Amino acid sequence: MKIDFKEEDLAKTLAKTKKKTLNITLVRLLVFFSLIPILVLSLTDYPVLFLILLLQLMLFVYLIVRFNHFKDAEIFLLELIKMDSERTLRAERKLHSFDPGNEFQSKSHPFAIDLDLFGEHSIFQLINHTCNNSGKKQLAEQMKKNIDADNAQVVKPAIDELAKDKKFLRSFEATGRAFIKEEKSKDKFYSWLKEPLKWKSFYFLPMFMGPILGLVLVFGVAAGLLPIAYLSFWILLGLVFLGFVFKPLADASKVFPSQGDIKTYRIWSDMLAEKDFSNSYLQEHNTIFKDKNNIPDGLKTLEQVSYLVDNRINMVYLIFNLLFWLDFGLFWKLKKWKSSYQNQLRELDQIFDEWQALVSLGSFSAEEKLTGEISWSEEELIAFSRLKHPLLRADIAVPNSLELSVQEQTVLLTGSNMSGKTTFMRTIGVNMVLANLGLRPFAENLLIGPFKLYTSMRNMDNLGESVSSFYAELARIKQVLSAAEKGEKVFFLMDEILKGTNTIDRIQGSEALIKQLAESGAKGIISTHDIELSGLENQLDYLKNYSFHSEISDNEIHFDYTLKKGPCPSFNAHKLMELMGIRFN
């Protein structure tokens, strides 16, 4: 199936397709109901009508094929239209209707929970354009990988090339969405592929004799040269012969993948076989569809054979089968297909999962119109200009800039409540994750050193595990320290550290932690409400103060969400409590 569509004419194309589907349905019904009187008359008074019956059956088969084609086109176009609506929702950051990928959350992961990679209103909901569970898992695993600059630099030009080919991206996604409905495990199918399909030499006799003698008998009866009893005997004889291949074909029918999966893989393979990518990474992932093994043809044959095997009890096939012993030809075609492709199909699942992830990243880049520059450095520094958070709408996200040189290891971030400290740190972390996926940042430019990313921001208690939020935070901090002490070049993001203890212990512990992180070589940002810690800038040349401010006027608190150098001069907790009804005497 190949549908040539124009974005501006989707509704019109769909209307025309539905009309064609309806017309074919009406003609098919007419042909079907005319089969009964023709069959009765051919068996009673007019044997010559057998020829008309055969022509009607052939026409009926053709109409089924055309109906399936237009029905597929209809489903495909409906998915394209639905994708347009989803694109608008993503642009408006209304993500509640999208799959949150909750199953990929992990409390022990270095950064996934803290950076909202998964869950409600998450990065996964923005990026995910996969079509089945294994593709979704592949994308999630890539999102959870820690920073790998070498791989990111290889993938980035591939994503850039894909992002320019919007029609390919949309066709690929719409195909999977249209036809992958109820996923069926392929484990039994792959086991079946390993087993020999026993073809006996004498099967060639009924394979050739069935169609030839069947036609002779049909024409002989139709011309009145042979009595109809000959045809009845032929059908009975056919039942005996067809019994030899009935079980292996029935066994194959039980293990075949779903028709939707096969159809999707076949269309995807055709699309990829036609593509000539200029990027070497994409070429490498596309090699299997262009080599001598001819995977597209193999999948096309599998689709045809599996459809016939699954529909052998269909009335039309049953009539042709009894007359011409078609099962032998079908069994031979299945055997030939199996011997040619049984060693090549298992890897297709993984290949198509990788393509689903690539298409997701390309689609995300195209939808967000990402143009920011990303650079990777061997030096331990990080810098960015006009960096924004992807989960905020473009028209309300406030950009910020920062530059941390090799000598500057720690940023102490202070600021009033709700001023933007946590969002700022998540903005940095999320953009590092996007860059690691091969995407451009939500910024004018982003420069990243050779870091591994670790965070300690959203630490929650767990009654089932008897874990307090303070203990959970200490466990996350230990994870960061352990990584740095093992020699990893760590970039950390820590939000309101040690908030679960008293002020004196918190300040003392925070100062000790800042020094220990620096001694281990880790670089990063720590936010705190303890303004007393800002004095460390005078003692530690590697620490710099930055802050977010707020202003209070007319009993309202105003934020500009803009990063400023130096410690925060004022806090707003007192005023917030007053506004919430707490009275201070």
Image: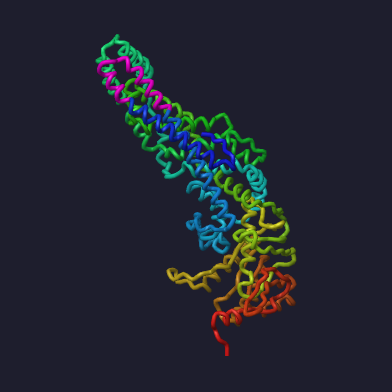
Q: Decide which of 418, 21 is in the foreground and name it.
A: 21
Q: In this view, does 249 lie to the left or right of 93?
A: left
Q: Give the range drawn in magenta.
A: 35-62
Say if 567 sits above or below 45 in the image.
below
Residue 202 appears in the figure: no
Residue 563: in magenta span: no
Residue at 38% in and 17% down: 208
Estimate the x, y position of residue 287 in percent, counting from the top left: 59, 36
User: Looking at the image, which residue sits at the far bottom?
Assistant: 585
Say if 344 sits above or below 223 in the image.
below
Q: In which quarter of the image is the C terminus?
A: bottom right
Estimate the x, y position of residue 139 in percent, counting from the top left: 55, 50
Estimate the x, y position of residue 124 in percent, counting from the top left: 55, 55
Residue 581 appears in the figure: yes
Question: Which is the main secondary structure of the residues drawn in magenta?
Answer: helix
Residue at 68% in and 60% down: 387
Q: Decide which of 23, 565 is in the foreground and name it.
A: 23
Residue 47: in magenta span: yes
Q: In this view, does 413 lie to the left or right of 136?
A: right
Say if 523 sits above or below 234 in the image.
below
Q: Decide which of 580, 110 is in the foreground and name it.
A: 580
Say if 144 sits above or below 349 in the image.
below
Q: Decide which of 169, 15 is in the foreground and name it.
A: 15
Q: How many marks?
A: 0
Q: Quadrant of residue 62?
A: top left
Q: In this view, does 252 lie to the left or right of 580?
A: left
Q: Is residue 350 left or right of residue 237?
A: right
Q: In which quarter of the image is residue 383?
A: bottom right
Estimate the x, y position of residue 74 in percent, counting from the top left: 48, 39
Which color scheme does this rendered protein use? rainbow
